[in-house]
């Protein structure tokens, strides 16, 4: 938002973003390949995630031998009444299921 300061044609400018409240953390180390890895599928049950994941699985299996998938059906909707609980449970569920990576799909 800008506010004119006098008749000199200059404006006071305020940065539109708020002050950062959380420190940045380093990103997780990226996998060098999906071959032999287990990939979790997360979906909000909107749009056509079931079709998208079917196509993704097909193409990723061609490219990465031995890749395994844990279906979105295993996790439930990531946009439901219990979404906070579901999302909070994911780190432990991923550990229990041996998940190496996740694909999160959503409608927009």
Image: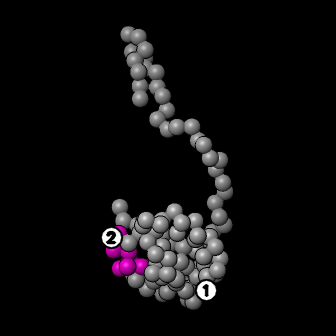
In the rendered structure, find residue 47 and report the number of the disc placed on it. Answer: 2
Q: Quadrant of the C terminus?
A: bottom left
Q: Is residue 104 visible?
A: yes
Residue furthest left in the image = 47
Residue furthest top in the image = 7
x and y percent of residue 103 in the render? 50, 72
Using the image as rendered, state which of residue 56 and residue 95 is in the foreground. 95
At 64% from the left edge and 60% from the top edge, which residue is drawn? 27
Using the image as rendered, state which of residue 38 and residue 78 is in the foreground. 78
SS category of the residue bearing label 2: loop
In the rendered structure, find residue 36 and report the number of the disc placed on it. Answer: 1
Q: Is residue 47 magenta?
A: yes
Q: Quadrant of the N terminus?
A: top left
Q: Quadrant of residue 20?
A: top right
Q: CA distance from mark 1 to mark 2?
A: 29 Å
At 57% from the left edge and 37% from the top edge, which residue is drawn? 19
Magenta stretch: helix, strand or loop mostly: helix
x and y percent of residue 96 in the render? 64, 80
x and y percent of residue 100 in the render? 62, 77
Q: Is residue 87 magenta?
A: no
**Left or right: 3 in relation to 100:** left
SS category of the residue bearing label 1: loop
């Amino acid at each position: 938002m800008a506010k004119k300061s006098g008749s000199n044609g200059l404006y006071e400018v305020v940065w539109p973003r708020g002050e950062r409240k959380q420190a940045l953390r380093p990103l997780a180390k990226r996998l060098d390949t999906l071959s032999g890895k287990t990939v979790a599928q997360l979906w909000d049950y909107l749009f056509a995630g079931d079709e998208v994941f079917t196509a993704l699985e097909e193409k990723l299996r061609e490219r990465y031998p031995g890749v395994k998938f844990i279906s979105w059906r295993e996790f439930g909707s990531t946009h439901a009444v219990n979404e906070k609980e579901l999302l909070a449970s994911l780190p432990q569920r991923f550990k229990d299921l041996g998940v190496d990576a996740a694909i999160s799909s959503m409608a927009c």
